[in-house]
Image: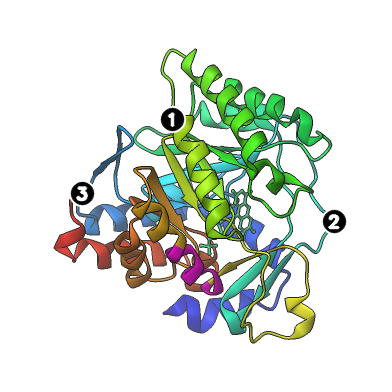
Amino acid sequence: MIYKKWLRPLLFRFDAEKVHNLAAKGLNNPIFRAGKQSLSALKQKPNPVQVMGLSFPNRLGMAAGFDKNGDYIHGLAALGFGFIETGTVTPKAQEGNPKPRLFRLPQDKAVINRMGFNNKGVHYLRANLEKRPPGVIIGGNIGKNKVTPNEQAVDDYVYCLNELRECVDYFTINISSPNTPDLRQLQDRAPLHRLLNRLQEVNAGFNRPRPLLVKIAPDMDKAYLDDVLEVLTENKITGIIATNTTVTRDGLRSSSQLIQENGGLSGRPLEKKSNEMIAYIRAHGSLTIIGVGGVFTGADMVAKIKAGAHLVQMYTGLIYEGPLAVRRILDYVNDRSEFNR
Ligand SMILES: Cc1cc2nc3c(=O)[nH]c(=O)nc-3n(C[C@H](O)[C@H](O)[C@H](O)COP(=O)(O)O)c2cc1C
């Protein structure tokens, strides 16, 4: 509990994005990695799981957005994550929104971000992924540049798909960030069909087509979600990531000034909504589900698997619980024999 008692109060006194960058760099420090790896090797019971034709060392992954450029894969793998979703990456490098753009809401165990797909571009990510360590499952989360109008968005996604085709194990098509203007309109039936149809066509031409997943927003009603599920199934999409951050602000306790910050809310307040969507998706089709939203503890991960998730991801939980949370969560799940399949 050193993290929560000593380190977190200290870190939370500084700007959220600066601390994030510092912590991420720390993960790649060779001393930290060596220590973590030997600790992980001692404790880790191998518990591989087959999903989407891939063998995952375990079911817990790093959600998209933490390692947008593939700079921290070694460090994240050393923490114990079974897979790492890099991105969201866009064809060209872009700055993202003006700072500050990342806000902590400790009273709600939540974060609001409006990063806006700041990333170094798909070529930079590709160069990093070509040096990836063996045995780590990598997702490539792809998006469009801010300057690309929605009518030409397909070209951006196709570009990223082509660039990364040899160096990721699965793709995530991100159409649900609230921080790129109008991006979520790509979830509408007609543009979604056009996008997925084209991406599957390109994917089918690869030597080894990759599983395609679509990451959705939590902010949609059942009828809209039914439409999305239908389009995904029609286009033989392998899976769905539920969910991205929410633009809603229900039931928060933080100051109204914080709550009013524009952007996507993640963490504890997202958990219920995310789990409800996972359960609904599981009951209405056969898509592979990666569940994300408000995972802080082993019990939270179990709740997602019980709701119907095949794999689970986390982001905000890492900010609040610290890097050792990954091992704690996996140990908790490993100790429950019903999840050791
Ligand atoms: C600072 C920050 C940046 C994020 N960036 C991305 C991103 O680039 N692409 C994406 O698909 N999701 C992104 N997300 C969303 C997370 O991947 C995840 O879906 C969401 O935060 C809910 O999970 P959590 O409650 O465990 O954080 C980001 C989240 C945060 C907090």
Q: Separation of disc 2 and disc 1 at Cα?
A: 38 Å
Q: Secondary structure at mark 3?
A: loop
The quarter of the picture showing ligand 1:
bottom right
Snapshot quadrant of residue 244: bottom right
Q: Is residue 250 magenta?
A: no
Snapshot quadrant of residue 303: bottom left
Q: Which residue is mark 1?
A: 236
Residue 115, placed above or below residue 306: above
Residue 239, placed above or below residue 219: above
Query: Relative to residue 294, is residue 159 drawn left or right?
Result: right
Percent position of residue 79, x then y: 40, 55
Q: Which residue is mark 3?
A: 46
Residue drawn where x is 66% and y is 73% of the image: 104
Q: Which callout, 3 or 1, points at the residue further toward the start of the chain?
A: 3
Residue 17, placed above or below residue 59: below
What range of the chain is rendered magenta? 268-276
Amino acid type for the residue under numbered disc 1: Lys
Q: Separation of disc 3 and disc 1 at Cα?
A: 32 Å
Percent position of residue 305, x then y: 31, 59
Q: Is residue 274 magenta?
A: yes
Q: Which mark is residue 98?
A: 2
